[in-house]
Amino acid sequence: MEGIKQSLLVAVLAATLLLSPLVVSGDDDDTGSVKPVVKIVKGKKLCTKGWECKKLSQYCCNQTISDYFQAYQFENLFSKRNSPVAHAAGFWDYHSFITAAAEYQPHGFGTSGGKVTAMKEVAAFLGHVGSKTSCGYGVATGGPLAWGLCYNKEMSPSQSYCDDSFKYTYPCTPGVAYYGRGAIPLYWNYNYGKAGQALKVDLLNNPEHIENNATLAFQAAIWRWMTPDKKHQPSAHDVFVGNWKPTKNDTLAKRVPGFGATMNILYGDDVCGKGDDEHMNNMVSHYQYYLDLMGVGREEAGPHEVLSCGEQAAFNPSSGTPASTSTSS
Ligand SMILES: *[C@@H]1O[C@H](CO)[C@@H](O)[C@H](O)[C@H]1NC(C)=O
Ligand SMILES: *[C@@H]1O[C@H](CO)[C@@H](O)[C@H](O)[C@H]1NC(C)=O
Ligand SMILES: *[C@@H]1O[C@H](CO)[C@@H](O)[C@H](O)[C@H]1NC(C)=O
């Protein structure tokens, strides 16, 4: 008892002393800069670890994201985002990403498994983000993959994305348009409604908050990554880090844990089950590029059938109605 108390005290002191230099320090300390404060609850080891991991959680005992993914790496991944021709220059930054991630690290975002799994998850999440926000087509300087986070909203929306069948649950506000905004862009009133509920921000009345606040934009994207579309289904996070065990039906539908399944969760048959789909390949390419830049290496991504969803049947097949329309829950 006394021993535990003492080591707790030491850990608290160590955490306090080390907390402030965490964000600015540029060194690559493999052991992590902040020592966890450990508690044993019902035989389970739970920790807190500074502001990135301030809720007691088993996931906070290992490294936090800023221990292995630092500002200079973010700059490398998104090197063209502040170029004069980018469409959201000055908007996206590292600090917004880490601040948004802090809410989800106690739930396992970027903190599940060992260091390699954690780094792969960040690369995979950002692979989706980079692909969805890229303006690096064709002959862009630096190559097409260097242009992630070029946008923070859809530039010429063709409609206002108001689905009136949700008028009782997520009614559209007159004069407001629910076009694509964010890091994994939200479209449609019902998606703004659900995200707003989860993040406790009134996005149905003020969807523009997403294009005005990079922290909120990253938060909405990480929320989407961490949250199943329907009850009893896995989230993109779950299928990626191995929380999800495929059923017989999943195996028959060629759904296996990995990056391919994250695209299946987020985009279904818009990109999956179509063989060599261009949008699917673009997401895979961003993921591989980021793995290389982060020093993990694309060979860690696994074989084709894990990376791709070209042969997978959708978790939620669309049935003629707008893609990813799900019942209100
Ligand atoms: C913490 O890291 C170890 C090895 O690095 C890993 O095996 C373990 O699963 C991690 N803990 C959690 C909760 O993910
Ligand atoms: C941006 O969003 C975050 C997260 O919701 C919030 O904490 C912060 O206050 C917002 N910033 C501004 C300037 O509104
Ligand atoms: C498995 O697939 C069959 C045939 O499509 C379906 O009838 C059944 O409900 C599915 N089982 C589960 C658990 O989803």
Image (cartoon, rainbow, N blue to C red):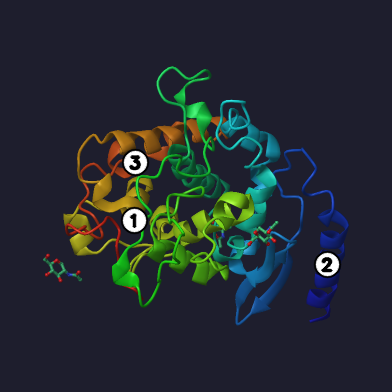
Q: Residue at x 40, y 71 (%)?
A: 171
Name the N-terminal-most of marks 2 and 3: 2
Question: Badge 2: how crowded within 10 Å, few (<14), some, or many (20+)?
Answer: many
Q: Residue at x 67, y 55 (%)?
A: 99
Determine if the C-beta at disc 2 is less than 8 A from ligand 1.
Answer: no
Label 1 vs label 2: CA separation? 40 Å
Taking depth in this image into account, of 218 and 34 the one nearest to the observer is 218
Split into quadrants, the picture shows ligand 1 in the one at bottom right
Q: Nearer the viewer, mark 1 or mark 2?
A: 1
Task: List the residue tagged with mark 2.
Answer: 12
User: Do callouts 1 and 2 mark residues in contact (Cβ within 8 Å)?
Assistant: no
Q: Nearer the viewer, mark 1 or mark 3?
A: 1
Q: Amino acid at mark 3?
A: Leu
**Measured along the vertical axis of the image, is residue 210 above or below residue 54?**
above
Counting every numbered tag in the picture gives 3
Task: List the residue tagged with mark 3.
Answer: 307
Question: Badge 1: how crowded within 10 Å, few (<14), some, or many (20+)?
Answer: many
Residue 265: mark: 1
Name the N-terminal-most of marks 1 and 3: 1
Q: Amino acid at mark 2?
A: Val
Residue 110 appears in the figure? no
Taking depth in this image into account, of 68 and 275 the one nearest to the observer is 275
- Per the image, label 1 sits on a secondary structure element best described as helix
